[in-house]
């Protein structure tokens, strides 16, 4: 996982969250996620909660983002190999890659199930024993490996514009379908790159993610860059909420403000 090598710097996490909420008016708690090589390290996090039942990773993430809890898990706390494998707590072996359990449920045949499993971005097995999620502003994970931002499409495009304000790059993201956590925290943990996803059926059914929300997983450094960019955009009048101009109005006055330097 590239993320572990990247993260040594401390951040003003509470300040970053305050800026995000001011800029985007988020309704869902911004959270951090961190992997731990040893379960003992996870258990030492202040005010850590440990599950008393079996859950999906989606539920664990939502305990932080919806309830404001700091929660630590090991493989034994998760319902099955799929949740475990995405975060590197179970092997991505031949049986897992075959995806036989999904044949006739999520896919028409064994070949489609196998292709989907092989398309998932996952953390390599054998590096970690535990994972913690926590509200970012709490500072209990400083730095986290990644930050998780739930937002509407309108909020999300402003966040993306902020990332692209300096050092522009085109973002190209994929959609694996079911197990979309591989598109967000799986990919971000694996690559260290900002990773956008459309939360899947399981995230919405078990994690309680609302219909209107998307998920961006990104490093604290990328989040800080996005905030700086969004502040610059706001000074230029490009901010959230994006006020509708009117579909029958003469557009020239508005375009002169939004797309030309004053």
Image (cartoon, rainbow, N blue to C red):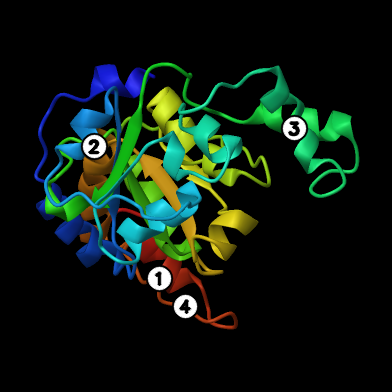
- Element type where label 2 sits in the image: loop
Marks 4/1 in contact by CB < 8 Å: the verdict is yes
Dot 1: element: loop
Residue 163: where, in percent of width, then height? 34, 41
Residue pointed to by mark 2: 144
Residue receiving disc 3: 99
Distance from the alpha carbon under mark 3 to that under mark 2: 31 Å
**Is residue 49 visible to the viewer in this orientation of the structure?**
yes
Residue ranking furthest to the right: 109
Residue shown at 21%/51% (left/top)?
136
SS of the residue under disc 4: loop
Q: Measured along the vertical axis of the image, is residue 227 above or below residue 63?
A: above
The image's mark for residue 141 is none
Task: Judge from the rendering whether residue 252 lies leftward or rightward of residue 25; answer left or right.
Answer: right
Quadrant of the snapshot with the C terminus:
bottom left
Q: Nearer the viewer, mark 4 or mark 3?
A: 3
Q: Residues within 10 Å of mark 2 (few under 14, many from 20)?
A: many
């Amino acid at each position: 996982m590239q993320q572990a090598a990247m993260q040594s710097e401390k951040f003003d996490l509470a300040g970053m969250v305050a800026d995000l909420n001011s800029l985007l008016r988020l309704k869902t708690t911004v959270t951090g996620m961190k992997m731990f090589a040893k379960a003992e390290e996870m258990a030492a996090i202040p005010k850590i909660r440990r599950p008393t039942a079996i859950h999906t990773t989606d539920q664990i993430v939502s305990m932080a983002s919806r309830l404001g809890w700091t929660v630590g898990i090991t493989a034994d706390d998760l319902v099955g190999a799929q949740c475990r494998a995405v975060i590197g707590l179970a092997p991505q072996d031949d049986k897992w890659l075959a995806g036989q359990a999904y044949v006739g449920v999520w896919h028409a045949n064994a070949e489609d199930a196998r292709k989907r499993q092989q398309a998932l971005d996952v953390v390599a097995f054998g590096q970690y024993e535990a994972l913690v999620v926590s509200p970012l502003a709490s500072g209990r994970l400083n730095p986290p490996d990644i930050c998780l931002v739930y937002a509407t499409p309108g909020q999300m495009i402003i966040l993306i514009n902020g990332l692209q304000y300096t050092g522009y790059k085109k973002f190209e993201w994929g959609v694996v379908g079911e197990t979309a956590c591989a598109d967000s925290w799986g990919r971000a943990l694996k690559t260290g790159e900002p990773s956008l996803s459309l939360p899947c059926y399981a995230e919405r059914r078990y994690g309680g993610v609302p219909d209107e929300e998307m998920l961006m997983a990104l490093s604290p450094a990328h989040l800080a860059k996005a905030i700086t960019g969004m502040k610059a955009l706001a000074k230029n009048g490009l901010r959230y909420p994006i006020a509708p101009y009117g579909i029958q109005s003469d557009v020239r006055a508005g375009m002169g403000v939004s797309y030309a330097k004053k």
